[in-house]
Image: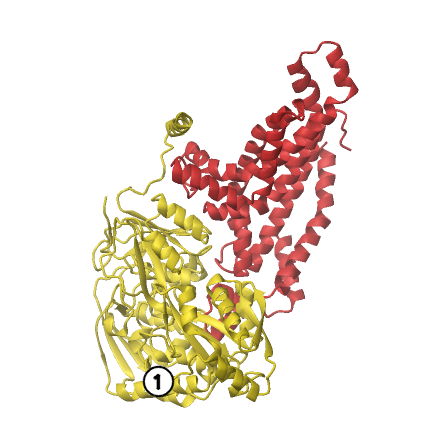
Chain colours: A yellow, B red
Amino acid sequence: MNVIKTTMAAALMATSALSLPTIAQAQDLTMAIAAKSAGQLDPHVSTKTQDKIVFAMIFNGLVRFAPGSMSSDAIEPDLAESWTSSEDGLVWEFKLREGVQFHGGYGELTAEDVVYSLTRAGNPDLSSVSSDYKAFKSVEAIDDYTVRITLSEVIPSVLGVVANYHGGNMVSKKAGEELGESFQTNPVGTGPFAFSQLAEGQFVELVAHEDYFRGAPEIDKITARYMSAASARDLAFQTGELHMIAGSREDRWVDKTSGGDATVAVFEPGELRTLHVNTSKPPFDDIRVRQALAHAINREELIAFAGSKVARGNEAPVPDGYIGHESDITFLPYDPEKAKALLAEAGYPDGVEIPIAITELASLFGPMQVIQAQLSKVGMNIKFDVMEHSAWHKAIRDDVSPLVLYGAARFPVADTYLTQFYHSDSIVKTPTAVTNFSHCDMADDQIVAARSEPNKEMQQQYWSEAQQILVDNVCSVPLFELLQVWALAPEIDLGYELGGSLSLGPVITEKTTLSE
Amino acid sequence: MASYILKRLMSTIPTLFGILTIVFVMIRIAPGDPALAILGDNASQEALDAFRERMGLNDPMIVQYWDFLKDLASGSLGVSMVTGKPVADSVASVLPFTLELAFGAIFFGIIIGVPIGIISAIWRNGWLDYFFRVVSLLGLSFPAFLTAILLILWLSIEWRIFPVISTPTGGGLWDRIYNLILPALSLGIIMVAYIMRSARSAMLDVMGEDYIRTARAKGAPGRRLIWHHALRNALIPIVTVVGLYFGLLIGNAVLTEIIFNRPGLGKLIVLSLNQRDYTTLQGLMIVSALMIVIVNLLTDLCYALVDPRVKLK
């Protein structure tokens, strides 16, 4: 057997340059993203998970979350070297760095590019996140390196919407106007890496931006491969063909992968898995049925199912670590007997059948099966209509499901989460719909008041009140948070401590290195 | 011959028209929303509405269909809703990889399947025959993705001969062939099973014919008897299987392409379906259907080549 093995290997290796594509080549880094392909590579257009990490390497904001952090407290200067705001918080001035160069010879970044970028981010025809910029009354270039933003009303985090995330990413005006729609396949930013090529369904290639204002990157080239099959990613990581891979968010995978030299990074943000309850239709229009539902769910069992290394409990409607998160929530504990009693009191002594729509995606379908088993014990019989993921997204926005298990990470300020999931403007099937599946509007006053409250303590109080109201009314049952999981080869030094990443992956910076 | 080919091509027009109409309607009535699938679940309602308007998705289906036909009549497959690039460019960028994978799989299928089919037929009911029949049954039973993973575990992880990620772009011809071997082999194993079984049964039929008995009585040597007299006449069923299987390969190749991270038509079809990229999907289905039509035509032409009694009219 050994003779055959040696002969075969020798014969194949001998045929010309048939060497394995090992990645020992200088500073070329290869990573795998868990997706079939890139979306639209325009930071103002795509809000898809797989594009966020690519944007983080190509673009900058006026300010940025320090690498490895997603805390608003860790916001630091990026393209702007300083900023000031008026006392009423309505006028903001940003002083830009001089000499920042765009990729591909598109010249120096000036205030005109910032005006163009923020105006573009606020235009629904060109941006998916235009609603974040509704309060922007004007954006003006005072001189080449000064930008003034005037707001129509105070918003919770101006720095948040000009940071290196979605609409806050600055694009080249010249490139945007010159390339038009094809900007999405030729993105031009100021980040440490420039877009080089996109092979649809295969990879996106980025190259070092030698004129990067923080210094030329150590890594010469990044190949970010789109590999949706977890087994394929694992196998290629094992052979050393990939330096970094998106992992499976389960303890078993973490234990298996961290067994060797590789590092498994488990980091923020936690995507909060929440069971949203449609309060506008029977049987959940009766608060007793909603309370029964909350009492029937055993969070500990769900966390154990997901794995304690990658999941943690959360009873509040706003994820842990977000500004405004309330950790001291009074919630309905697991109590199946009480659940049965409440259900009987509500007129369902023999139980109730609840048909729901659920995605085929394992990260949601798996926990929903556990919930189904838990609810069946108190007489709530869940019937699944399992759908392809995209079809499910459409169906839940068409309000067809009385229960919606949803997982999301958003900009880490309570207002974003509360507005998108619990404000009446966001109720599904309305002209301003976002993702309010519960139809709850009882915390509107607190959400709106917190938004423009200049006093931080008062603002926190409004957010805490809002969260308690939502829990008391069982608009949803917050379940657990699922953290981000990536595996890194031992030769990678990211150049920073990875505690969190709004880009949902370890971002490669100018300081990242690969050892031999 | 030329008029036969022209007639056959002309007769495919209604078929293609039917296919594209069915595809057009089916993808639009399938649940899902292209705007959500493309912009992401965090996109604002305003942006989703603007996208639908821009892409003409708010127009009645008949208007969209008419626009699609107008594009097609002008020789355009349309523009991708995701990338904004012409669909023809997307197709052209992946078609060579699909073709090389399909031909690679067929190559393995023929060079392994035909000889073992013949051996099985010659030593009918012998231990070799039983062995190959069991092996071919395994080949048929194993899904392509499982075969691919097993081959990776064996040849990439254990023996470190081939890469896990098949990189078909860049490098020279040898590099390209090297990157093709494992995916083509994993897909070709199923092909081996099909070809082996049809070669065996065709050879058994032919070997029982009178003219074989006559040739043997006249003292024709065994090798000549098999390769010259029998195999040539057994080729038609094999050609038929290869032709039929070529069409199936596009579908079967999807998982192989995903596992090996290769570009390809099948993978692009699945991707477009997931993203609800209607225009790309329509273009891809037209190209796939056209490919199957052409392969069927080539199969028919091959009949005339391998059997002079077949006349193309």
Q: What x and y, as percent, mark residue B27?
A: 62, 60
Quickly name the residue at label 1: A463
Is B271 in front, or is B136? B136
Is A252 drawn above or below residue B226 in the view shown?
A: below
Above-or-below relation of B119 to A402: above
Nearest the viewer among A455 and B230 is B230
Is B142 located above or below residue B74 in the figure?
above
How crowded pointer 1 is (Cα within 10 Å; few <14, some 14-19, many 20+) is rated as many
Q: Say whether residue A152 is left or right of residue B282.
A: left
Expressed as whole percent of the image width and height from the top left, the position of residue B183 reads 49, 40
Residue at 28 percent of width and 72 percent of height? A71
Q: For residue A247, say whether it is visible.
A: no
Going 22% across and 57% down the picture, which residue do you hit? A495
**Where residue B57 sits: x, y (%)?**
58, 67
Residue A270, by quadrant, is bottom left
Q: Amino acid at mark 1?
A: Trp
Q: Nearer the viewer, residue A3 or B87?
A: A3
Q: Position of residue A459 (x, y in %)?
A: 31, 86
Instruction: In this rendered view, identify the residue nearer to me: A18 or B313.
Output: A18
Q: Is residue A418 left or right of residue B12?
A: left
Residue A473 lies left or right of residue A156; in this view the side is right
The quadrant in which the C terminus of chain A is found is top left
